[in-house]
Each structure stands twice: as C-alpha cells, then as structure tokens.
Amino acid sequence: MKKNQNIPLNYKEKNNSRIALLCSVVVLVLLVLFFHQLDNVLIQKPREEAARKQEEEKAAAELAANTPEVTTASVIAVGDNLYHDNLIWSGQNDSGEWNYDHIYTNVLDEIQAADVAMVDQETVLTTDHDAVSGYPAFATPTEVGDALVKAGFDVIESATNHVDDYGYDYMAQTLNFWETNYPEIPVLGIHSTQEDADTVKTLEVNGITIAFLNYVYGTNNSGAGEGREYMIDIFDREKIASMVARAKEISDCVVFVAQWGREDEAMPTEYEKEWAVFLMEQGVDVVIGGHPHILQPYGWLSDDNGNEMLIFYSVGNFVSTQESLTGLLGGMAGFTIQKSTLKGESTVQILDPEIKPLVMHYNHDTGEYGPYMLEDYTEELASQHSVREIIGDEFTLANLQAKFKEIMSMNVEPSTNTDLLDVSFDYEMNMYDSSGNIVEDVWSVTADQYLQEQAEGSQGDAGEGESSDGSGDSYEDDTGGWEDYEDSGYE
C-alpha cells in the first residue's frame, strides 16, 4: 500500500523543528553580533581612532604653527673695575703669586646666575708687576683679567678715558692678553687692527644673537699714536650710525656701552641725553652708561616714530677705593632679552629692567676688599669701612639706602635738541666745537639743582594744601628710574 507523503508531523517532531529553527536564529544572531563586534574592534574603532588622532595632530600642528617659539637671555652689567693702589697690593702674595679672586667673592652668585655678565675694565693691563700703578695713570695686573673671567664675566668693556694712560704699548699688552688667553670673550672698544675695529662683536645665547658696541667721549692722553686711530672707539656720529646698522643686520639685539657724562654728577648731562636720543633713533635696544663714577637714573626712552630704548645712564663704580659715599654706591643693571619666533619671523622684547644697588667695601686694617649687594650689606660692615676715616659718620647703611632711593627717584628731562653730537673733549672734559671753540654747557641741570627745585616745588604745593611724597612720576619720554625704586625695599 502506498505511503501518504503529506501526513502532518506529530507534536514532538514539530517541537524539535521549532527548536532547531530557534537555535539557527540564535546562532545567526550571535554570528551577526560576533562579526559586528569583530568589525568594530578590527576596523571601525581603529578607523575612528586614526581619524581622531589625525584631527588632534592637525589641531596641534595648527596650534604650533601659530604659537611663537620663545627663548630668553638674562643680562647684567656692572660699572668701573677701577684698581687703585691698595686694591692692587691686596693681590700680591708672599709666595710671589698675584691673585684677585677674593675681590669678587661676595657677588659671585649674581654674576654667575646671568646668561651674560658685562663689566667695564676701566684701565689697561700689564704683565710687568714692577710697572703697575693705581693713580692718576693706571696700569693694572693681568691677574685682574683672570679674576674677572673666573668670576663669570662674559663681556669686557674697554673704551674708557684711561685706556691710553700709557699709550700704545700698554694697549697692545692688554689686547694681547685677552686675545691670547681668552679669545672667546668679546673685548669691546679697543682693537688691534682696522679689520677688528670694523667688526661688530657678538655672543649667541639661548638662540639669541646679541651685538655689543662700546664708545668713549675721549681719553686722558693722545691716543695710540698717528696711524692707529682705529684702536680706540671714540664717539663719532657717522661711525656709530654705520656700526649700529651693521650690528642690527647680524643680531637680534644691540647693546651699546657709553662712556660719557660728568664725573661725580648723578644727573645725566645734555650731551648724554642728546646722544641717547640719537642711539634710540638708530635702533639701539639697550644703553649702559658709565664714567661719572656714581649712579644715575635709568628707564625707557621712546618717541612718536615707534622707537623705544632702555637706558641706564650710569651704573657707577663696581670696584674701587674711592672716598665718597656716592663713589662707593654702585649698581648692577639687569634686564631680560626675550626672542619670539613665528613662521620664520622673529621679534625681540627687553623685559624686567632693574638696578640692584652695590656697595664697594674696603677695610685697610683687615685687608678686606670687594663689592657687596647692598641688600647683603650690614651696619656693622659700614662701621668698619675705612672711608669713615675720611668722611666720618656720613657712611652708614641708612645713608647708602637713602642715596640710592634719591638718585633713582630723579626724572631725566628730555633733550632740548642742542647740537652736541659733534663736540670733542679735552682731558679736563671741556667741550669744543669743530672749529676748536670752547662750548659752554648751559643746558645741563645738576642733581643738586634738580633736588632743590623739587624741594621748592613741594613746599609750594604743600602751602596750597597739597601733599608731596617726592616720588618720581613718568613724563613724556619715559626716562628715569621711578618704575623700580619705590618697590626696591629701601625706605
């Protein structure tokens, strides 16, 4: 009998069939989920991660492309390293060796912390110990040069009025000492050849190229001799304009060291102020002045053409045995050069200018000689200073602090646009025009005149019911040290 092919499945068979179908569906779902997860892990997530990383890298690259690279260099500069007789003899030892490391012991930390440290070596150097002298013509042992380098000074300034005290021979000895022993150190203002005189000295620090120039108003003698006029850099309008232009072409920042001004005068002369304006107009970034042997104010000079320059009119003495409170109160000028480079273009800013006061201490009885930061000086040390044998109780810590505050509070009035850029000087600092006629300085205001006028003005204001605190306020060319003196801590 033929079987019926269409007989319905029984319940068990139907149930098994459903279970098999369900299992197939589950397996299929699981496979779909598995392959979806596999696709997510192996393809989608890496793709998304790569895209996210690419976006982050793109954003970082755009940020980097629009963020300047910034580097800085800190600079300090001190004044005259002027060795009088007692200082010279302090370096002579019983063994026959000469050494002056002890002179700089108390300021080593400040010197060595700077990226660039500058000093005015006021006098020529000699290897002949029998020929050394401390006044009025100076010849200083070469061991002083060794001590300066060991202390951490990187730049030596040499265009001074004493550089030709003994003529060509001692200048040649000085240059030979530096060129032979420390060829890597820029020695400014004196030259062994015309080629060197036409070369701008530079240092590269932290990717910043700094150019240095150093000129003096004149000298005490007749120079290095005929045919060797190139040996000393003396103020000359055309020469300086040319050298500043050359310096700007090869550097990021131009620092100009000026030996100028009237000795023992705390207020800049009209000659200083007129030259300051000229230097600013040529593009000098910082001026560091010396020669008056005492401090003068500092600050910013600017004009309507966008020129701006930091100027320290005088940082006073560094090392000496001078015999006045102001002659022993010096300064350590400081500032930071900041270079910002973006898309191949660089800009430079001068930041954080300041003068830290120094005091030159000496005690002839104990043989102690050397400068201190004024913040480290004590009344006990002041009481032991040998200058008290000459000026008595005037030399105290409080008077040093007060004098620093007084000088830094003075405002320097802008130049009156006199015509002093081409004058020359004799050894007594008399000015002469190009025809040899003496030029009387009727424009300069002394510190005493300034302070008297301030006092009279304060009395007049007080009489009208207004108080006067004597603080230095800014004025149109922004020079003067008022920005820092009020916060200096010296009350």
Image (cartoon, rainbow, N blue to C red):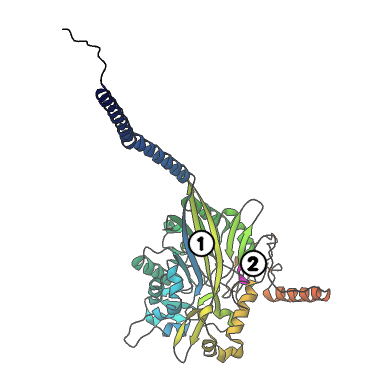
Q: CA distance from mark 1 to mark 2?
A: 19 Å
Circle 1: element type: strand
Question: Which circle marks residue 168 in the picture?
Answer: none
Circle 2: element type: loop
Q: Is residue 3 magenta?
A: no
| Tag 1–tag 2 contact (CB < 8 Å) | no
At label 2, counting other C-alpha atoms closer than 10 Å, the crowd grade (few under 14, some 14-19, many 20 or more) is: many
- Point out the tag, 1 or 2, that comes first from the N-terminus: 1
- Residue 11 place in picture, x, y as percent: 27, 23
Q: Residue at x 42, y 79 (%)?
A: 105
Q: Is residue 301 above or below residue 162?
A: above
At label 1, counting other C-alpha atoms closer than 10 Å, the crowd grade (few under 14, some 14-19, many 20 or more) is: some
Characterize the magenta stretch by its predominant secondary structure. Answer: loop
Q: Is residue 297 above or below residue 491?
A: above
Frontmost residue, 144 versus 359: 359
Label 1 sits on what residue type? Answer: Thr
Label 2 sits on what residue type? Answer: Gly
Q: Residue at x 60, y 56 (%)?
A: 308
Residue marked by disc 1: 336
Write down the region rendered in magenta.
Answer: 477-491
- Residue 469 place in picture, x, y as percent: 72, 74
Picture quarter with the N terminus: top left
Residue marked by disc 2: 480
Instruction: Name the outermost residue toward the right.
Output: 464
Q: Is residue 67 above or below residue 428?
A: above
- Residue 270 place in picture, x, y as percent: 66, 65
Q: Is residue 435 visible?
A: no
Query: Would residue 42 be found to the left or right of residue 411 on screen?
Result: left
